[in-house]
């Protein structure tokens, strides 16, 4: 596309693929690193990539995830019923399809063959509510540590995309802001666990979720800020918002294997 070739000129007039791309080698998040590497410069006169634009899109994805998590928690808890298992399978397939579609589109964006638009929004939205329903139903049906790692995912997603950016802006000291993010994630998860009598078993995992999740979020926000400061194409705000929510959900979900062992031992 002409916007990919003609638009690859930075504010200082420097052109060339390597110079124009945001350096993704320092981003430890696999998905966000691909996103950062795919965002071209904005065309003259067009809207540029901004942190504010990414934030409200992240909140949209996060709210759909948390709402679906609540639905799964309250309505799909009994996995012994056939219709519940069928619904869980359906939302899992929907989530996988959505993620596959986004990664296919991301490959096209990296090759300069398109920009995120209406179809991207339509195909990307099912991912968050799909995994929200699945995690909510599993969490309600499982006790101990396993349940509260899943609950911590919901806490981290909603806090991460709505509160963490404010903390990063207000607290200039990097270590202090990161520590505040950890507390903002751990405390709600810990209080939810304590209210149900499983707090003693899950405190460690609430802390792990808070520490690892906050660090991951900071790295992704650094990448988003890098795009916002180098006059990138605003159409890719949707892709960055989806990637951040994806990273938060998948990162914490990767802890489930270890937590399941502790959960079985605690029963």
Image: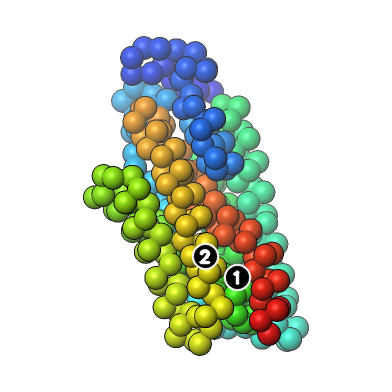
Residue 109: % across, % down? 57, 33
Q: Residues within 10 Å of mark 1 (few under 14, many from 20)?
A: many
Residue occupying the point 43% across, 67% down: 186
Q: Residues within 10 Å of mark 2 (few under 14, many from 20)?
A: many
What residue is disc 2 on? 153
Counting residues from the start of the chain, the first of labels 2 and 1 encountered is: 1
Residue 16: % across, % down? 49, 13
**Quarter of the image containing the N terminus?**
top right
In the orientation shown, which residue stands out farthest toward the left? 170
Query: Of the residues tagged 2 and 1, which is closer to the observer?
Result: 2
Which secondary structure lies at badge 2?
A: helix
Residue 132: % across, % down? 56, 67
Q: CA distance from mark 2 to mark 1?
A: 9 Å
Type of colouring: rainbow
Compared to residue 237, the image places residue 254 above or below, namely below
Q: Is residue 11 left or right of residue 265?
A: left
**Quarter of the image containing the C terminus?**
bottom right
The answer, for residue 21, to whether it is visible in the render is yes
The answer, for residue 158, to whether it is visible in the render is no
Compared to residue 177, the image places residue 157 above or below, namely below
Q: Is residue 223 left or right of residue 164?
A: right
Could you say which is closer to the camera, residue 194 or residue 232?
194
Residue occupying the point 29% across, 53% down: 166
Residue 194: % across, % down? 46, 82
Could you say which is closer to the camera, residue 48 or residue 176?
176
Q: Which mark is residue 135?
A: 1
- Would you say the residues marked 2 and 1 are in contact, meaning their CB atoms lie under 8 Å apart? yes
Could you say which is closer to the camera, residue 148 or residue 57?
148
Q: Which mark is residue 35?
A: none
Compared to residue 91, the image places residue 111 above or below, namely above
Which secondary structure lies at badge 1?
A: helix
């Amino acid at each position: 596309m002409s916007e990919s070739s003609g638009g690859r000129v930075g504010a200082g007039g420097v052109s060339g693929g390597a110079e124009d791309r945001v350096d993704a080698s320092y981003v430890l998040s696999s998905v966000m690193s691909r996103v950062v590497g795919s965002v071209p410069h904005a065309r003259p006169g067009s809207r540029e990539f901004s942190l504010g634009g990414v934030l409200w899109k992240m909140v949209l994805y996060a709210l759909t995830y948390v709402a679906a998590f609540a639905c799964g928690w309250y309505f799909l808890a009994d996995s012994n019923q056939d219709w519940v298992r069928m619904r869980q399978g359906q939302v899992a397939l929907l989530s996988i399809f959505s993620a596959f579609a986004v990664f296919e589109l991301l490959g096209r964006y990296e090759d300069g063959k398109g920009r995120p638009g209406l179809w991207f929004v339509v195909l990307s939205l099912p991912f968050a509510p799909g995994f929200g329903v699945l995690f909510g139903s599993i969490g309600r049906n499982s006790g101990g540590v396993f349940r509260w790692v899943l609950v911590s995912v919901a806490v981290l997603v909603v806090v991460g995309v709505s509160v963490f950016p404010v903390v990063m802006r207000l607290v200039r000291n990097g270590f202090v802001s990161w520590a505040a993010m950890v507390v903002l994630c751990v405390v709600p998860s810990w209080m939810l666990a304590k209210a149900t009598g499983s707090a003693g078993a899950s405190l460690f995992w609430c802390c792990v979720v808070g520490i690892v999740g906050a660090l991951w979020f900071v790295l992704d926000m650094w990448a988003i800020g890098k795009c916002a400061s180098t006059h990138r194409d605003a159409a890719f705000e949707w892709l960055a918002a989806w990637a951040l929510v994806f990273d938060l959900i998948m990162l914490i979900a990767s802890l489930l294997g270890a937590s399941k062992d502790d959960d079985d031992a605690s029963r």
